Image (spheres, rainbow, N blue to C red):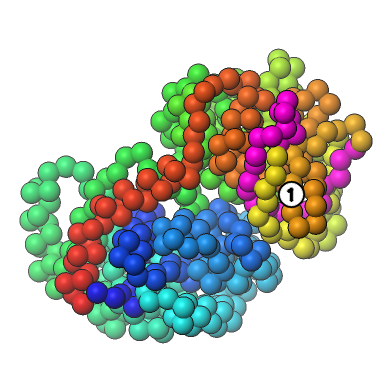
């Protein structure tokens, strides 16, 4: 059976749309079908860099991997990266188009839809099947006008929809019925069935509810998917604050308001020797072996947030007692003397005093640097440990001659030093996202920070195993879809 275009929508955010799309992509890929994922509009601060130097949502890069593809910008033609409660950076076909507030973007959606449909047309020409992920919920009636993320897209391209709900949250039947009530008749008709996600327990106790739902709506429950523990899949946006790690090596990461690419820490969360904690604004800040300042979509605002909550003093004390500090991207910029934004790239133009822990200064620029990188670590004795990742940042950082580089990157234009280390080798800053994903770099960075371990975590292998697990769980769903064809 060939699914030409199928859209997966959810009754809520985090209902499981991303994993269902990834699972269907993997199952169809196993059958030798040329399948591609697509998300017309994504609002997320976790992003990835494509081989052609564009930027898409990190979840679509995961889905591309499930489909056996390198990620490209048509998989996520519109990416929205919030920089405040009302404003965001709008990325179209992988490149920054503008910064807009919510009202301006609402008017811009007709232009954005043209970009979405152009991407969809290209994907139709190249692939046999397109599995499309919706955003949020189609029941958000205030966003119905000019919708490009859910039913607006489905109605325009005339594709069937399956609706996913998370039973672990409770109220799953109300979620399905309430969503249907918020849709027009043509949109309700477009839904070919329901998927119940994250079920645990005795399925026989659920079956009366399934029968009732089918009788009430006239639509089948296509599959009941199990709750799968221990998955290592890239989160689309929300931080998983609750950690299962019990290792003795303590790493803390401040959960800043505009944290970006917190997937940088997935390999560390999977390491059995590490206890990694995201520290929210209302949580006490514990002692740690390593503190990592994460990426940020609004460096100066998040810098002010850290200072207001006492992180400056925590970091200074941590360093006095011999602890290590890593700053990634925006976190790297914060470690310096000054963060300057003369053009108002992230809001109001001006300068902010940094944390003063590295002898660097940063100027935010209008141009965004987007590239995949690879190279070697310079802080190991033999300097052979490999690193690979990607850069996503708007800004240039200048280091003094007293500092040391952290990495050397190799590329078509030769070798390039990257990042900064303090003269006492306690602090390391870098623009490289995903630097812990490569086993050699992860091992080297942990040794630099003080953890001597023989355990090697290969995040890509864990990700592949997780994709296969969710795919195997979704075999009944594919079978049900095949019966409907």
Residue carrying label 1? 410
Highlighted magenta segment, given as a residue range: 377-400
Q: Residue at x 48, y 71 (%)?
A: 40
Judged from this view, the residue extending furthest toward the top is 321
Q: Residue at x 58, y 48 (%)?
A: 261
Q: Is residue 49 visible?
A: yes
Q: Residue at x 32, y 40 (%)?
A: 229
Q: Secondary structure at mark 1?
A: strand
Q: Is residue 37 left or right of residue 81?
A: left
Picture coordinates of residue 280, whole percent (x, y): 55, 36
Judged from this view, the residue extending furthest toward the right is 401
> Image height check: is 177 above or below 392?
below
Q: Is residue 397 magenta?
A: yes
Q: Is residue 472 magenta?
A: no
Q: Quadrant of residue 394?
A: bottom right
Picture coordinates of residue 422, whole percent (x, y): 81, 29
Q: Residue at x 43, y 67 (%)?
A: 37
């Amino acid at each position: 059976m060939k699914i030409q275009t199928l859209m997966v929508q959810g009754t809520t955010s985090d209902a499981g749309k991303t994993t269902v799309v990834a699972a269907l992509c993997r199952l169809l890929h196993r059958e030798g079908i040329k399948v591609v994922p697509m998300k017309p509009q994504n609002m997320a601060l976790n992003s990835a860099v494509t081989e052609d130097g564009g930027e898409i949502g990190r979840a679509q890069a995961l889905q591309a991997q499930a489909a056996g593809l390198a990620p490209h910008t048509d998989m996520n033609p519109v990416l929205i990266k919030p920089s405040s409660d009302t404003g965001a950076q709008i990325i179209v076909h992988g490149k920054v188009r503008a910064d807009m507030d919510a009202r301006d973007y609402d008017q811009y959606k007709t232009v954005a839809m043209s970009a979405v449909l152009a991407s969809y047309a290209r994907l139709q020409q190249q692939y046999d099947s397109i599995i499309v992920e919706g955003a949020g919920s189609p029941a958000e009636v205030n966003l119905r006008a000019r919708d490009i993320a859910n039913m607006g897209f489905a109605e325009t391209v005339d594709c069937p929809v399956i609706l996913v709900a998370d039973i672990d949250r409770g109220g799953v039947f109300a979620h399905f019925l309430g969503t249907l009530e918020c849709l027009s008749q043509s949109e309700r008709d477009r839904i070919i069935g329901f998927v119940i996600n994250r079920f645990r327990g005795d399925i026989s106790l659920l079956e009366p509810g399934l029968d009732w739902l089918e009788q009430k709506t006239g639509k089948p429950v296509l599959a009941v998917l199990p709750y799968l523990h221990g998955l290592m899949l890239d989160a689309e946006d929300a931080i998983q604050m609750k950690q299962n790690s019990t290792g003795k090596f303590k790493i803390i990461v401040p959960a800043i308001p505009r944290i970006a690419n917190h997937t940088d820490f997935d390999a560390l969360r999977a390491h059995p020797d590490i206890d990694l904690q995201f520290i929210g604004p209302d949580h006490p800040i514990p002692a740690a072996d390593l503190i990592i300042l994460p990426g940020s979509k609004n460096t100066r605002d998040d810098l002010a947030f850290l200072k207001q909550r006492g992180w400056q003093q925590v970091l200074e004390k941590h360093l006095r007692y011999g602890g290590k500090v890593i700053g990634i991207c925006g976190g790297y910029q914060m470690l310096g003397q000054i963060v300057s934004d003369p053009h108002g790239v992230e809001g109001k133009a001006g300068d902010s005093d940094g944390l003063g822990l590295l002898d660097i200064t940063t100027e935010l620029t209008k141009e965004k640097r987007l590239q995949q990188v690879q190279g070697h670590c310079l802080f190991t004795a033999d300097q052979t440990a490999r690193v690979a990742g990607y850069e996503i940042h708007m800004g240039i950082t200048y280091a003094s001659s007293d500092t040391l580089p952290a990495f050397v990157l190799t590329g078509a234009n030769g070798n390039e030093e990257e990042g900064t280390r303090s003269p006492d080798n306690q602090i390391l800053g870098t623009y490289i996202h995903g630097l812990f994903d490569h086993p050699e770099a992860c091992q080297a960075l942990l040794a630099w920070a003080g953890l001597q371990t023989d355990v090697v975590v290969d995040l890509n292998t864990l990700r592949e195993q997780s994709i296969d697990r969710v795919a195997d769980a979704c075999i009944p769903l594919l079978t049900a879809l095949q019966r409907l064809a």
